[in-house]
């Protein structure tokens, strides 16, 4: 039996719960050696950490290797949306205000739009953006949530009741629902934030209707800030961040969740709210917040930000579970697929540098850059890794949001505002291809036992 920490409670009224908890822990612990014995791909990953193939997709591709003489070798990371390299998309859209909207069109419809197609698309999306006064009053204001991700999930499920055809899972109806949900996410997230600030923290209530002429990034900053003001650079950096978070293959936890739940034949609101539940976890969408808290801890404990040896010594303490959260992880460093580089991190880092320079926070950016470089080398050394290790997009996204003045409670919701486009594309793909219900197997490793009457049971 594996060891676990027994929890005891001081209050005598919780003795029963204490006993039940410990019984549950004893019952639930599985010998980790059994995974290897039965050939179980734990977490749907092989022994090298590579994801097990469970489906096919044309929506996006995550590439981190090259083939040389028949062998797969680590390479600079690449990310493709519907066959287009994300570097090319960002470069081609660098002078545009609606890069995220154009990316959403690409993900949903399979190709980049013409000028006329895109203008019509923007009109449709703008008409879907506002939340009704009734919904805002009864859903947003009535039950404000400290964690906005829970509020988004509840709001999304409640939209079911405002839909005349919520159970229609034809591709046409799912597309209509998806476009409406994508359009409403920004208002829903910002309203949830303001509602909690007002009702629970007694702050002034600021509720603005989205502007039809604004992009998603512009509306997010406009509706979030009391004065509604933002610079062109601020909106552009946020727009780029939304593009980079919009999609990342079918195997990431939340997108796979969308596929799994969709395969059961459920409605759009249930499928996408399940994806939100997955994204909320700190191992997924909440990772950038972990990075921010870790970096604040490092900044507080490293006296000289330019002393690389002092930084390295503190990072070793983190890896040795002696500092920060004692989990032994340097958050934002390393990725399950990418080795030499995460293309999203490379792009966002360049924009973070521009934003930091404009906001007078160059020293903070330089410290992030220094920690990134030292952390990669230190992890490789301490963990005896022979393959390259890179920073992932979470390492700089939290810094970007912080410089933009976005509160921490909106970090993960912004991820959801972006990734809802990818989830919707994958849901449509699952429905169009009429796949079987996704049902992986679990190996039973318990014991078969005879039933005992209660009067002869011990305990």
Image: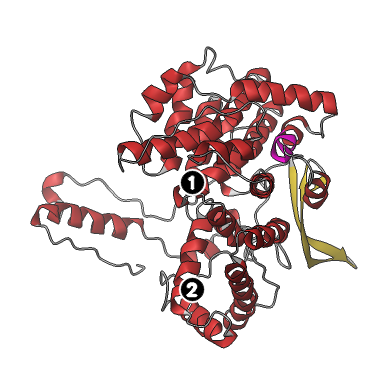
The residue most toward the left is 12
Question: What kind of secondary structure does the magenta stretch mostly adopt?
Answer: helix
Name the residue carrying label 2.
299
**x, y percent for residue 454:** 15, 45
11 on left or right of 393: left
Residue 300 seen in this snapshot: yes
Residue found 24% across the figure and 59% down from its top: 22
The residue most toward the right is 69
155 on left or right of 450: right
Q: CA distance from mark 2 to mark 1?
A: 23 Å
Q: Picture quarter containing residue 221?
A: top right
Q: Which mark is residue 410?
A: 1
Q: Nearer the viewer, residue 254 or 314?
A: 314
Give the mark nearer the N terminus: 2 vs 1.
2
Question: In which quadrant will I find the C terminus?
Answer: bottom left
Q: Secondary structure at mark 2?
A: helix
Residue 424, compared with residue 80, is above or below; it is above
Residues rendered magenta in the picture: 98-104
174 on left or right of 200: right
**Could you tell me if the residues under marks 2 and 1 are in contact, i.e. CB atoms within 8 Å?**
no
Badge 1: few (under 14), some or many (20 or more) residues near its Cα, within 10 Å? many
**x, y percent for residue 113:** 82, 30
**x, y percent for residue 339:** 71, 66
């Amino acid at each position: 039996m594996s060891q676990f920490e027994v929890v005891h409670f001081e209050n005598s009224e919780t003795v029963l719960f204490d006993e039940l908890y410990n019984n549950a822990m004893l019952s639930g612990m599985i010998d980790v050696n059994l995974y290897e014995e039965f050939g179980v791909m734990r977490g749907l990953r092989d022994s090298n950490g590579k994801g097990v193939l469970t489906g096919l997709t044309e929506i996006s591709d995550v590439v981190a290797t090259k083939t040389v003489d028949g062998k797969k070798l680590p390479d600079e990371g690449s990310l493709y949306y519907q066959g287009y390299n994300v570097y090319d998309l960002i470069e081609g859209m660098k002078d545009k205000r609606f890069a995220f909207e154009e990316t959403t069109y690409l993900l949903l419809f399979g190709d980049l739009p013409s000028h006329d197609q895109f203008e019509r698309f923007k009109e449709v999306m703008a008409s879907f953006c506002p939340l009704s006064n009734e919904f805002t009053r009864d859903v947003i204001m009535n039950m404000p949530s400290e964690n906005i991700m829970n509020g988004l999930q509840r709001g999304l499920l409640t939209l079911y009741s405002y839909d005349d055809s919520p159970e229609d899972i034809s591709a046409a109806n799912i597309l209509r629902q998806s476009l409406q949900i994508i359009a409403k996410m920004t208002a829903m997230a910002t309203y949830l934030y303001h509602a909690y600030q007002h009702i629970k923290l007694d702050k002034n209530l600021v509720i603005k209707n989205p502007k039809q002429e604004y992009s998603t990034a512009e509306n997010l900053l406009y509706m979030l800030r009391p004065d509604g003001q933002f610079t062109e650079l601020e909106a552009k950096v946020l727009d780029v961040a939304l593009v980079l978070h919009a999609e990342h293959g079918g195997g990431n936890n939340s997108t796979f969740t969308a596929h799994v739940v969709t395969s059961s034949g459920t409605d759009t609101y249930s499928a996408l709210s399940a994806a939100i539940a997955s994204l909320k976890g700190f191992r997924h969408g909440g990772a950038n917040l972990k990075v921010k808290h870790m970096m604040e801890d490092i900044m507080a404990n490293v006296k000289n930000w330019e002393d690389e040896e002092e930084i390295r010594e503190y990072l070793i303490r983190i890896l040795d579970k002696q500092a920060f959260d004692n989990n032994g992880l340097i958050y934002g460093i390393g990725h399950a697929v990418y080795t030499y580089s995460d293309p999203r991190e490379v792009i966002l880092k360049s924009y973070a540098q521009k934003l930091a320079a404009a906001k007078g926070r160059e020293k903070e950016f330089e410290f992030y850059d220094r920690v990134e470089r030292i952390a990669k080398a230190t992890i490789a050394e301490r963990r005896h890794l022979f393959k390259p290790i890179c920073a992932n997009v979470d390492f700089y996204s939290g810094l970007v949001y912080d410089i933009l003045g976005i509160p921490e409670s909106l970090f993960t919701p912004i991820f959801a505002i972006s990734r809802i486009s990818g989830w919707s594309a994958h849901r449509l793909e699952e429905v169009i291809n009429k796949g079987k219900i996704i049902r992986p197997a679990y190996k039973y490793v318990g014991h078969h036992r005879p039933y005992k009457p209660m009067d002869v049971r011990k305990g």
